[in-house]
């Protein structure tokens, strides 16, 4: 506090012996009457109790004695005024410490108390000591709270019957700040600036006044409950012994100690409210780019609508970070998903719209849509109640017409879906300890470069991270751990998903994911998936396995490199197409799978690591590379590593282009596939037409469309054992399934040839 400010100031009034012309019989202001020659007061040079003293005759209803010097009143300083007095004759009056509070320009500060409690004189000759404390703060022990006063004319009043005579010893004024503050001299207290701390008075102005006067010291919010009814921005460090309460719309900005523990102290340990107010501040001033939770756990009573928490913005595009802490839901019904069934109409001409939606007012933004012809992870992006329509995150592949859909709104600890656009937002070193009660994060409807790094999303009830629109554009998920709440369940009984995305250019790097239904559902292109480990098996013999990564558009323009794909497969579909039949597009292409470890155990032999699933006819592979991977099955062989799921349609094998499947390692896989594949044909009996066996080593059941090379492997001879030097005619796409080829010679021959054949046309 401010005791040091008074060092060097003279607070003590002069002795009466120095003259009575500075002692006023009025209010003490310049020009008021003095006791020098007034006739009602005189200096007594020798008194047995006081030595020199002032003798006063009480002649008015209130007889005043005021020092006319300006005694400074400083914020944080407390002045004790002491008067020793005795009655010597006449009527016995009462005595009280009093003063005139002055402000700027020599004006009186109205509304402040001008006197302390009265003390009655009850006998003659007995010395009575009267004290009172004057200060700027409304605190226990302060008799006259002078908030806003700059100085005072201080003294005493005599009240009661007139005619009495009293003698007054020299008046003492001392700085007693230390009585209140002792060892806290580095602080300024908001109470010294008028804060009441009663929970009903708006103390915002007092907070900012204390902050303005701190000059490098810490602002102390002493015991009490302080209502801040409007925005308060504190430049100085603030220490909270008491707590504040604020309306939702008001912001508290702690510029010097902007961290979660400070807000927790400010709001009396209310973890939920402290985070809300800290997040408000994070988006509303530029001094700090990050909110440090300092390792604290935040227990949430229910989902946080982050846009509603901030309250004023629907878009934000400046980098902001929440780091270093833990969120945990408090168990309760607030986390239960809301489920609505409703009839609606879908038309492929409006691929991301449901129209004529019944019961639309009960359908929430961010709801998962389920129904016939609906792909995985399709969400409600917008609700237009007036138009009776919903905007979807993705098209529906086969839902034309009117049907009943189910809309399920999961509950997320941090829900950013109220933002139209939130870009450059980072969550770092945070654990979302969902505990099976809540989901983790829902992204904004639009935004660039959301970044989740070094985080744990542990046991989400339904979803780890969800995108309901374009808020995942350029999203980065780095070095995170996703752990399922469904670990004891069989794969086919699980329903949780670590994350999904709809937009392009996501980067998924160095993450670990355990025992979800799916690791991720990727609905955009340009994805980089590097260095992750996702495992989703169970302990069943011949157990079911599901897709770990689901690509939902055919031309993904993505790479999957250096990952550990454990007990699941890469599934490649076009389920987010309003018309899944081949249109003006490149079909299934643009995917590179290289340098990964694929492993599985205890599965049926029909399991595959790479599955292409066209949802409509006419599709083919057009630019696919699977190179230098390791495929391994444990506790049993599998037939092959790849397949086409023909539930809806098969591929057009006559249009395959630019497919590379080579340099891979196969362990416990019966058919080791490649493209191109090397084939040896050998005839020991002279034949003019040599026919290969069906080539099971070609990927995806493809045809022999191209014979790259065919040359003798050793001597080729005719039926007379004469060497044959003629080149044969090569005939691809032979046989009922077109998976054979013929080598046709001019004459019957014997010998052996080596050929390289492909399922595609590389040109």
Image (cartoon, rainbow, N blue to C red):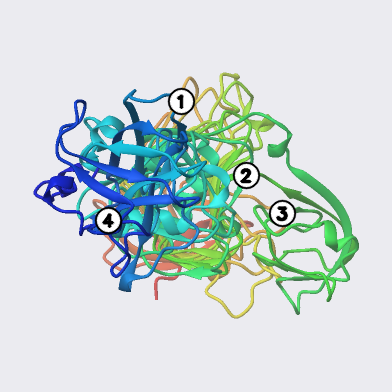
* CA gap, disc 4 and disc 3: 85 Å
- Single out the mark in the foreground, 2 or 1: 1
**Residue at point 29% right, 55% down?**
716
Residue 412 lies, in percent from the top left, at 60, 45
Label 3, on which residue?
367
SS of the residue under disc 4: loop
Q: Quadrant of the N terminus?
A: top left
Label 4, on which residue?
35
- Given residues 177 and 742, the one toward you in this image is 177
Residue 674 lies, in percent from the top left, at 40, 50
Judge the density around disc 1: few (<14), some (14-19), many (≥20) Cα neighbours within 10 Å. some
In-image side of 496 versus 84 (left or right)? right
- Single out the mark in the foreground, 1 or 3: 1
In-image side of 86 versus 482 (left or right)? left
| Lower position in the chain sequence, tag 2 or tag 3 | 2
Judge the density around disc 2: few (<14), some (14-19), many (≥20) Cα neighbours within 10 Å. some
Where is 294 relative to 588, above or below? above
The answer to whether marks 2 and 4 mark residues whose Cβ atoms lie closer than 8 Å is: no
In-image side of 535 versus 625 (left or right)? right
């Amino acid at each position: 506090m401010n005791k040091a400010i008074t060092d060097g100031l003279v607070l003590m009034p002069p002795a009466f012996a120095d003259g009575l012309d500075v002692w006023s019989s009025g209010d003490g202001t310049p020009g008021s009457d003095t006791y020098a020659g007034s006739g009602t007061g005189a200096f007594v040079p020798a008194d047995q109790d006081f030595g020199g003293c002032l003798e006063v005759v009480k002649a008015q209803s209130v007889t005043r004695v005021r020092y006319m010097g300006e005694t400074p009143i400083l914020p944080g300083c407390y002045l004790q005024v002491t008067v020793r007095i005795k009655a010597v004759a006449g009527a016995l009056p009462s005595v009280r410490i009093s003063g005139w509070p002055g402000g700027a320009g020599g004006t009186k500060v109205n509304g402040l108390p001008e006197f302390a409690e009265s003390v009655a004189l009850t006998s003659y000759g007995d010395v009575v000591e009267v004290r009172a404390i004057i200060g700027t703060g409304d605190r226990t022990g302060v008799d006259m709270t002078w908030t806003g006063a700059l100085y005072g004319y201080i003294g005493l009043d005599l009240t009661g019957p007139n005619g009495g005579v009293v003698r007054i010893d020299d008046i003492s004024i001392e700085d007693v700040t230390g009585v209140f503050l002792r060892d806290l001299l580095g602080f300024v207290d908001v109470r010294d600036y008028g804060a009441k701390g009663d929970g009903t008075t708006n103390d915002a102005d007092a907070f900012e006044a204390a902050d303005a006067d701190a000059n490098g010291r810490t602002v102390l919010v002493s015991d009490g409950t302080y209502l801040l009814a409007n925005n308060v921005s504190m430049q100085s460090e603030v220490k909270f012994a008491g707590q504040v309460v604020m309306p939702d719309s008001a912001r508290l900005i702690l510029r010097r100690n902007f961290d979660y523990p400070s807000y927790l102290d400010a709001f009396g340990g209310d973890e939920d409210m402290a985070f809300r107010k800290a997040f408000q501040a994070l988006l509303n001033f530029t001094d700090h780019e990050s909110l440090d939770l300092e390792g604290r756990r935040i227990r949430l009573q229910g989902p946080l609508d982050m846009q509603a928490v901030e309250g004023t913005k629907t878009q934000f595009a400046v980098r902001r970070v929440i780091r270093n802490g833990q969120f945990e839901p408090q168990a309760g019904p607030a986390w239960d998903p809301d489920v609505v069934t409703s009839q609606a109409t879908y038309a492929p001409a409006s691929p991301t719209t449901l129209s004529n939606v019944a019961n639309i007012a009960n359908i929430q933004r961010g709801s998962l849509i389920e129904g016939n012809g609906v792909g995985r992870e399709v969400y409600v992006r917008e609700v237009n109640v007036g138009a009776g329509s919903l905007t979807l995150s993705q098209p529906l592949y086969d839902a034309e017409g009117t049907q009943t859909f189910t809309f399920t709104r999961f509950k997320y600890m941090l829900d950013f879906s109220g933002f139209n656009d939130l870009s450059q937002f980072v969550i770092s070193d945070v654990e979302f300890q969902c505990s099976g009660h809540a989901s983790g994060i829902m992204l904004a409807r639009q935004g660039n470069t959301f970044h989740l790094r070094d985080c744990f999303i542990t046991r989400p009830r339904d979803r780890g991270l969800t995108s309901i629109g374009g808020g995942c554009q350029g999203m980065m998920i780095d070095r995170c751990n996703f752990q399922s709440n469904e670990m004891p369940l069989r794969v086919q009984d699980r329903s949780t998903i670590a994350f999904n995305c709809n937009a392009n250019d996501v980067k998924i790097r160095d993450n670990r994911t355990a025992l979800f239904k799916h690791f991720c559902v990727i609905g955009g292109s340009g994805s980089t998936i590097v260095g992750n480990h996702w495992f989703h098996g169970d302990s069943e013999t011949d157990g079911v396995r599901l897709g770990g990564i689901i690509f939902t558009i055919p031309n993904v323009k993505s790479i999957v490199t250096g990952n550990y794909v454990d007990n699941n497969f890469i599934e490649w579909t076009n389920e987010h197409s309003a018309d899944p039949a081949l249109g003006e597009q490149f079909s299934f292409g643009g995917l590179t799978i290289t340098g990964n470890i694929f492993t599985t155990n205890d599965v049926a032999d029909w399991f595959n690591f790479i599955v292409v699933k066209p949802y409509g006819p006419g599709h083919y592979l057009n630019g696919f590379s699977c190179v230098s991977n390791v495929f391994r099955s444990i506790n049993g062989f599998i037939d092959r590593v790849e397949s086409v799921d023909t539930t809806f349609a098969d591929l057009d094998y006559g249009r395959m282009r630019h497919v590379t499947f080579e340099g891979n390692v196969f362990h416990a896989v019966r058919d080791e596939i490649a493209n191109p594949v090397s084939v040896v044909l050998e005839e020991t009996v002279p034949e003019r037409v040599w026919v290969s066996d069906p080539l099971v080593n070609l990927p995806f059941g493809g045809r022999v469309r191209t014979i790259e090379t065919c040359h003798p492997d050793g001597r080729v001879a005719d039926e007379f054992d004469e060497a044959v030097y003629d080149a044969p005619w090569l005939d691809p796409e032979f046989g009922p399934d077109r998976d054979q080829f013929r080598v046709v010679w001019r004459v019957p021959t014997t010998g052996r040839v080596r050929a390289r054949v492909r399922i595609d046309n590389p040109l």
